[in-house]
Amino acid sequence: MKKYLILLLSFGFALSCFSQKTKKNDKNEDKNKFEGRITYIGKVTRIPDKKKTTAKLGDVDSYFDLVINENFFRKEENIQNRLQINTTEGIKNEIFFQTIRPIPGDTIIFIEATPQEQHHYGLTARNSDACSSKKVSAKTSKRKKIVRQKCTKVICNMVTTDNIRVQLVAWVAADIKVNGFYTPYFGELSGFPLMYDYYNGEYVVTYTATKIKKGTILDSYFSRPNTQSITMTEYLNNN
């Protein structure tokens, strides 16, 4: 938090006006900082190499919610009504844990990744190194509304490790702030993506927000489950 030091009484009035303006800006920033739940749907939108997959354009990849406060976010994902995968990440710290539960079923696999594993496996958008080169362009002039939010188009051009050129697009809402949130491939954006592309090595999935619900989310919501955890390395070695 910025601190302002009054050095001379003669500057008192000017500093007072500046301080009031700053407080007003801080309030506006706090107002824009998002806390709550955003619902997304992911669909296959591009297939760079049809030989790599049996997926078809328009196939639903998954539904998920992002639950967010200033310290954590959790991706609560339903994969084709077969698996419920909840992935929790720290925004300010390298925290990563995941629960996997079959649908239907009560058995939970609890995976907790160390910071070293997060880097090694590229588990988070912050640590992702999924292509040989990429360039995120500046925001374009193109705009549109998504869930009643004004969004600006951002483009990422990349070349994959197997020399496939892919262009990814994100639509970013400047009025929604989650400082420290990283978008896959795009990194940390100035604003929050309400629509964005993700290339999984076979096809491009476009995730689009369909609902936004603001509200207080306590840190306790992101607590680890009361069950024995395994490391990501142990999980990958056994599956």
Image (cartoon, rainbow, N blue to C red):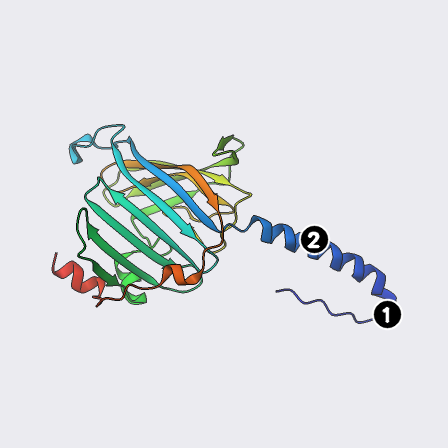
Residue 26 lies left or right of residue 164; in this view the side is right
Q: Kindly identify the amino acid type of the residue bearing the numbered disc 1.
A: Leu
**Nearer the camera: disc 1 or disc 2:** 2
Question: Which residue is nearer to you in this view: 187 or 232?
Answer: 232
Mark 2 highlights which residue? 24
- The Cα–Cα distance between marks 1 and 2, rounded to whole angstroms, is 23 Å
Q: Position of residue 217 (x, y in %)?
A: 45, 55
Place of residue 59 in the rendered image (x, y in percent of width and height, measured from the top left) = 24, 31
Q: Residue furthest bottom?
A: 7
Q: Are marks 1 and 2 in contact (CB under 8 Å)?
A: no
Position of 92 relative to 143 (above/below): below
Q: Residue furthest top?
A: 57
Residue neighbourhood size for the residue with mark 2, other residues' Cα within 10 Å, grouped as few (<14), some (14–19), many (≥20): few
How many marks are shown on the rendered structure? 2
Residue found at x 35% / y 41%: 158
Q: What crowding class fits label 1: few (fewer than 14 Cα within 10 Å), some (14-19), or many (20 or more)?
A: few
Residue 194 is at least partly visible in this image: yes
Residue picked out by circle 1? 9
Up/down of 37 relative to 229, above or below: above
Mark found first going from the N terminus, 1 or 2: 1
Which residue is at a point 22% across and 28% down the rendered structure image? 56
Quadrant placement of the C terminus: bottom left
Q: Is residue 155 visible?
A: no
Q: Quadrant of the N terminus?
A: bottom right
> Measuring 19% from the left and 55% from the top, which residue is drawn there?
106
Q: Nearer the viewer, residue 49 or 233?
A: 233
Where residue 111 sits: x, y (%)? 24, 62
What residue type is disc 2 on? Lys
Looking at the rendered structure, which numbered label has been put on residue 222?
Answer: none
